[in-house]
């Protein structure tokens, strides 16, 4: 097979070899190893789960979802596999199906920062603000990695904006940027808070920071246009 030609003989532990290859940036080799592992043991859920996780990172969500669902159908009950599938489905039309999956993930791995972030983010997207606020309180009290703590703070900004508390939202955005200064999304939600406060020049500047790093950022482009139009209307009334 093409996979066999790419990697040669199957290592004793193909999943460990695939993870190592992925860590070193050898994505094609990692996926080829996993294909061989699935070929060798087609009823073993572990290789399906690992390949689904790697395809998620490679931005192939539909393929990732198929493999993760297969792993679960074969008996994989680990919270992380449910969490990965939930994270994939959260940005698809199957969004509602992600709820029990991510709920299971955070209950099974309290220190899983990615699951907490995906879980709270999903609740915010579903406009379940009361639940999002309660789960944020739980998550922010945990000793999570700074990356995920910063991500949770960006969702706190969204919750506070939904509560019409933009001053508190701005404070949370500043805290998020301290933890993740390179986060485009932290700049985006900071702009949202500033816009609600009527500080339109500053809100537009936050979008400019994003567009400097990511020129084709669609949400930042739209938000910049909204803030610029609102500023023009305000000036026209003077």
Image: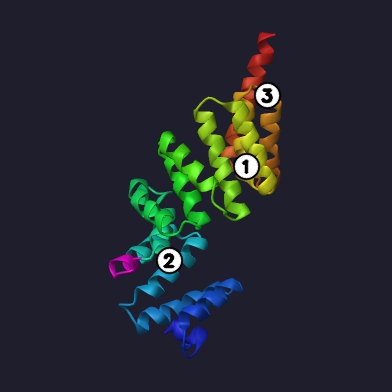
Whole-angstrom CA distance, mark 1 to mark 3, is 17 Å
| Mark earlier in primary sequence (2, 1) | 2
Of 167 and 191, the residue lying toward us: 167
The answer to whether marks 2 and 1 mark residues whose Cβ atoms lie closer than 8 Å is no
Residue 174's image quarter? top right
Vertical comparison of 201 with 139: above or below: above
Relative image position of residue 180 (x, y in whole percent): 66, 49
Residue 213 shown in magenta: no
Q: Residue 156: horizontal and vertical position, in percent? A: 54, 38
In the rendered structure, the answer to whether residue 70 lies left or right of residue 87 reads left
* Helix, strand or loop under label 3: loop
The residue under label 1 is 186
Position above or below: 22 against 227: below
Q: Residue furthest bottom?
A: 9
Labelled disc at residue 199? 3
Q: Earlier in the sequence, mark 1 or mark 3?
A: 1
Position in image of residue 122 (x %, y %): 44, 45
Looking at the image, which is closer to me, 230 or 127?
127
Q: Secondary structure at mark 2?
A: helix
Quadrant placement of the N terminus:
bottom left
Q: Residue at x 54, y 51 (%)?
A: 142
At a point 45% along the width and 82% down the height, the residue shown is 2
Please give the residue where the numbered disc 2 appears in the rendered image.
52
Q: What residue range appears in magenta?
A: 70-77
């Amino acid at each position: 097979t093409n996979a066999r030609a790419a990697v040669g003989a199957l290592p004793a532990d193909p999943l460990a070899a695939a993870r190592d290859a992925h860590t070193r940036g050898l994505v094609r080799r990692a996926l080829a190893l996993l294909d061989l592992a699935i070929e060798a043991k087609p009823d073993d859920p572990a290789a399906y789960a690992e390949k689904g996780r790697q395809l998620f990172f490679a931005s192939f969500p539909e393929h990732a979802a198929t493999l993760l669902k297969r792993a679960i159908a074969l008996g994989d009950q680990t919270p992380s596999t449910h969490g990965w599938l939930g994270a994939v489905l959260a940005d698809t039309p199957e969004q509602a199906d992600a709820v029990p999956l991510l709920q299971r993930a955070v209950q099974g791995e309290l220190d899983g920062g990615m699951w907490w972030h995906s879980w709270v983010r999903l609740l915010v997207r579903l406009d379940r603000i009361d639940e999002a606020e309660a789960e944020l309180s739980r998550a922010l009290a945990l000793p999570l990695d700074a990356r995920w703590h910063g991500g949770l703070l960006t969702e706190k900004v969204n919750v506070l904006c939904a509560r019409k508390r933009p001053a508190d939202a701005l404070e949370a955005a500043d805290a998020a940027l301290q933890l993740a200064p390179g986060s485009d999304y932290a700049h985006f939600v900071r702009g949202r808070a500033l816009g609600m406060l009527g500080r339109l020049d500053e809100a537009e500047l936050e979008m400019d920071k994003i567009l400097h790093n990511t020129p084709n950022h669609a949400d930042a482009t739209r938000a910049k246009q909204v803030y610029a139009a609102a500023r023009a209307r305000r000036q026209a009334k003077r």
